[in-house]
Image: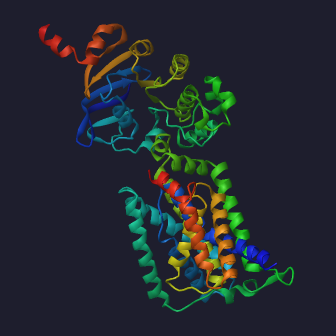
Amino acid sequence: MTWVNDVVQGIMLGGFYALLACGLALMFGLMRIINLAHGDLAVLGAYLVYLLLEHWNTSPFLGFVAVLPVMLLIGYVLQRVLLERSLRSGLLVPLLTTFGLSIVIQNLLDQGFSPDDRSLGASAGNIATASWQITSQLSIPAIGALALGVAIVIFGGLQLFLSKTGPGRQMRATAQDPDTAELVGINSRAVYARATAIAVAIAAVGGVFLAIRSSFTPYSGPTYLIFAFEAVVIGGLGSSLWATLAGGIVLGVAQTIGGQINPEYPILAGHIVFLAVLASPRGGLLNLRRATA
Amino acid sequence: MTLLAIDHLQLRHGLLEAVRDFSLSVGEGETVALVGANGAGKTTLLRAIAGAHRASAGTISFDGDDITRVPAHRRVRMGIALVPEGRRLFPSLTVEENLLVAADGGRGGRWTVDSVIAAFPLLARLRDQRAATLSGGEQQATAIGRALMTNPRLLLLDEVSLGLAPLAVDAVYESLPVLIAGGATILLVEQDLTRAMKAADRIVCLLEGQLVLEGARDQLTREQITDAYFGLHRTRGVSA
């Protein structure tokens, strides 16, 4: 029964990782950009919500609704001002740019908010600690279930957007062949900027869950970036959105089961699954080679 | 009325001069064939007109406006569409999606999914099939249809017969009169001289990036064109 509990907890943890991974996968799938500042953008979203709650006593989820337009704008401007230019110089330059951006965001947050631990757990109220006791061995935490639910809604919504709407169609066409997309009248730069806006906004959703689940500091980003990146790789490098959600869940389950084997193992177990996928013949490395070719 | 005017255009691939001091004007409603050997600069020229290749000197005007610096996607809105060499469909999009994605960025007009399918009946049963699974001829029809969806005033066709079975090529060329009747001006690149001479009002011959021969179809002989194609006129020109 403990194993069933581990798997259930892992699936919910995976939903949280998938939220963090979603924007990363979107940007990689569309532009081949590996956004090393993705974790820091998630943390930035958490801080913006934190800032808002200092002035208005409300729920972090309502606070996020107010922060959402700001995050969309940050993503749009980030693409137009910084990433678009770096993308022109090849695939490696955006990697360096986002690495630098990651450091800049961390230090700005440190300056603005001090390096103290913060959390949105207290302002989230009951939902942060509530759980449904199914059996004596199996309980479902409300926040975990909510993260998984939100992940499913976001992945589903994004999938619908990509497959059913005009702008989504343009995004898929641009991902496959940006030159030809231009030749049929698609402004590929605008498509890229829209995608980055969406990616940064979803990163902030992950950031809010991160801040409710545990504490965060200006330097929390890179840790979560690694989990998000592992979820993307296990899920086939942004080739499909549902695979990224599955990748997050595989990572989450690997971590909880690793933790059951030995309390010191959860992170290690996740890394091992990630490396196994990366090294497997049909796995990530092959995709990575194809992606960069 | 002149629709497209190219003036002293120079195009480069790095150090290589692909097109040199090229000038041409195409009137509204005309069909012009661009012929020349491989590497003569035909494809580069079409890509430059469509905005996919930057001009290093000279100007391109469309309907009186200088478009030399206008990005490709805005030229589509102005009414220029290119059917690129090798079709270049979006492989994982369906035929219908390939058509619709072009409609989003183009001008409104008489071409819709239904009218394109009426012009290319073979596409009717392939509507929901992914472009990657189509045969060469079906892909070419989709690629032309996709360009039409933007309702172009100037349609650029780059080697539409390349790699197709002769029957499929016939089908493509049979569709040209439909396009011309629709008022489109056409600039096409074609390796097959017989087809080029049949389809076009005017023939323009490129050799090593330069215009070497130009004339109305009925004023040029096949021999003249062949000579220009291979660069034989240079020596003959001296002796004549």
In the figure, is residue A259 to the left or right of B169?
Answer: right
Above or below residue A265? Residue B229 is above
Q: Nearer the viewer, residue B22 or B163?
A: B163
Image point 64% across, 67% down: which residue? Answer: A248
Q: Quadrant of residue B210?
A: top left
Above or below residue A253? Residue A175 is above
Above or below residue B7? Residue B231 is above
Q: Is residue B32 visible?
A: yes
Q: Quadrant of residue A90?
A: bottom left
Count of numbered labels shown in the rendering: 0
Q: Nearer the viewer, residue B88 or A275?
A: A275
Image point 38% across, 44% down: which residue? Answer: B70
In the figure, is residue B137 to the left or right of B154?
Answer: right
Q: Nearer the viewer, residue B65 or B98?
A: B98
Residue A39 location, x and y as percent?
53, 74
Residue B140 location, x and y as percent?
53, 28
Q: Is residue B9 visible?
A: no
Q: Nearer the viewer, residue B202 or B43?
A: B43
Q: How is the image coloured?
A: rainbow
> Residue most toward the left?
B239
Image point 42% across, 78% down: which residue? Answer: A103
Residue B49 location, x and y as percent?
37, 35
Above or below residue A228? Residue A220 is below
Image point 52% across, 47% down: which residue? Answer: A176
In the figure, is residue A220 to the left or right of A161?
Answer: left
In the figure, is residue B193 to the left or right of B238?
Answer: right
Q: In which quadrant will I find the N terminus of chain A?
A: bottom right
